[in-house]
Image (spheres, rainbow, N blue to C red):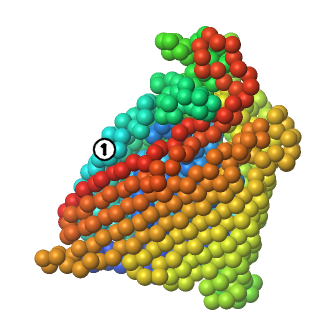
Amino acid sequence: MDRSVLRAALAPLLITTAAVPARAVDGVDAPPAGAAGGGAAVEVVVEGARPPRSASETVRERAEVKAAPHRTASDVLQLVPGVFATQHSGEGKAHQIFFRGFDAVHGQDIEIWVAGAPVNEVSNVHGQGYADLHFVMPEVIRELRAQPGSYDPRQGDFAVAGSVRFELGYDEPGITVAAGAGSGGARRLFLAYHPERADEATFAAFEAYETDGFGPARAASRASLIAQGVYQPVSGLSARVMASAFAARFGSAGVLRLDDIEAGKVDRLGSYDPDQGGDSSRAQLVLDLRAAGDAPGEGLSLAPFVVLRALRLRSNFTGYLADPVSGDATEQRNEAITAGATASYRLRFPLLSDRDAFEAGVVARADWIEQSQRRLAAVDDRPTATLVDARVRATDIAGYLDASIRPARRVEVRGGVRADGLAYQVVDGAGDGAAARGAQGVHVGGKGTVDVVLLPGLRALASVGQGFRSPQARSLGDGERAPFTRALSAEAGLRYADERVRASAALFHARLSDDLVFDEATGRNEPVPATARTGVALDAVARPAPWLVSSVGLTYTRAAFTAAGGRHAAGDLLPFVPQVVARADLAVTPRLGALFGRRLEARAGAGATLLHRRPLPFGEIGHDALLTDVTARLRYHRVEIGLDVYNVLDAAWFDGEFVYPSSFNRGAAPDLLPARHVTVGAPRSVFASLSLFIG
């Protein structure tokens, strides 16, 4: 089939996403590689890695991901400098994510995509942008790309602190069977298949996991399936299909008052309410079509997606504060169907140089949401009040124009503009009768980067961009022009890259027109005044030898309110956000020779995370935490044994700290003085595994 015919057929759709990216060094296009496994090469449409949009843009590939043990994809997020993820409500609820001075809570300030599908949930009843990554097994993450700030026109809703994109693949040919068990009754089965002669993007993987937890009310189980295939239906056209299904059930110990722990009234691993927890499910389908253009770097792509999500949460953060008899436990339900597509057409256009290029793209997304929140009686879970009962229809239609121009041989200017039109229809059934309302608004944001090559491998970048976070639909009035949280970000720094080392250093600043902070009384995020972040980010990845890889990231951020409102004054530090986040990973993979003619290999690695200075409400400061995880593997031919140790130093730490009034004694007079509440972090745990590779 003629390529011009293909382009003509796809051009009206203007759809984009990444297909099978070629490896490159810091944005320099790499030539297409042959198929894995030494078989006949399969022609695919390949796009080189896009040049960075900021000095601190980060890529973590499979070698860095495998350096230390990870239970979930959210754990892998911590490889990004400035990211720390906690799980204060059980192994199944979306992690709370901190990123460069932002308390993104469960995703409100960080845009997350997996294999071409969005993960953030619009207007989720528990929190705007709720992003649950439990459906992704760490073994199938081939690349993690983080774009801090909002400097790329492809970044959309929730890209306030930045964006993260996961590309999936599995590189072990044949069939993999892995089983393991460990502390707290943890049990896991992992199965995978990757055709020997296919690209690693073609695979299928299954996970089943159960645990009794490290204390009461912490049992959890999940099952996940991901299948992805890359095909070439006709010459010059690449197709990728990805499908996944996931379900989980989990318990949660909830919060404990720190004064009760210190007084011995409750065990630090105990729970006031063992009935907390919930369940969740997710299914998604992605189709990614990509057609090559006549010149390198040109092309069309089309990627429709559909996602089905369900979530139920039961929690109690305040005990019997609001209702001394029946209690303050709440149950939240959220069911959503998301359908949409992303699209672009990229064209080489020699404006000032023969490498200048332009890209036009569109993004469309529609969400159908049903949600509720009820207060439950402590004795029999009888509903005592309906706080939320709503149906939401949300639509986001966006278009962008991006350009890459070289006004001089060592200077490249990249940037463009993006416009998002958001519309909401809400039917709220809480209270006396249902009420329908609608709202709509438009956000237009400019983004730009200047990239100057100083020396071979060394470049300086300066970036500025406007981003946004969409509003919680239930907060909008009828006919209201949808208000957006507007973000202005700026960054300047240096990047260095060669065959063995990648490193960057950057200064950054971000300002938000308004913000969201967790409110214990409602169990969700509530509006607060304008905020700002200023900080520095350092990152380095080194591969000095084929058997050695290391990565280090460090950020310092000061996040503060710039306006007064409620209990917050201008200049107050933003609560819950750690000012210093550091992460270091190191892995060695020596080949030990041969035994009876079969290859003997080993792998040992460690990852350490440091949190320092976590501001809390009412001027308090949370506890620091230093967590270290280690792994060891020994493989002989087709058999591998492994040992993972999490929190190897057995640090006694809190993964969540809050300050607010509470009363956990039924019928007692409420104590209205703010008190510190904590969720206890996991102690040291051990997990052993046995893997068999067939093929």
- In this rendered view, identify the residue nearer to me: 234 or 130: 130
Quadrant hosting residue 127: top right
Q: Is residue 211 shown left or right of residue 373?
A: left
Mark 1 lies on a secondary structure that is strand
Extreme residue toward the left, this view: 596
Q: Is residue 483 above or below residue 509?
A: above
Q: Which residue is depicted at the point 38% across and 61% down?
A: 631
**Residue 10, visible in the rendered structure:** no
- Locate residue 87, reporting x and y percent: 52, 43
| Left-right relation of 229 to 517 | left
Residue, x 67% and y 66% (percent of image)?
537
Tag 1: amino acid: Arg
Q: Is residue 479 above or below residue 648?
A: above
* Looking at the image, residue 580 lies above or below residue 296: above
Query: Which residue is denoted by mark 1 in the rendering?
Result: 187
Most extreme residue toward the front, as rendered?
A: 263
Residue at 32% in and 74% down: 36
Tell me the crowding category of disc 1: few under 14, some 14 to 19, or many 20 or more residues within 10 angstroms, Cα based.
Answer: some
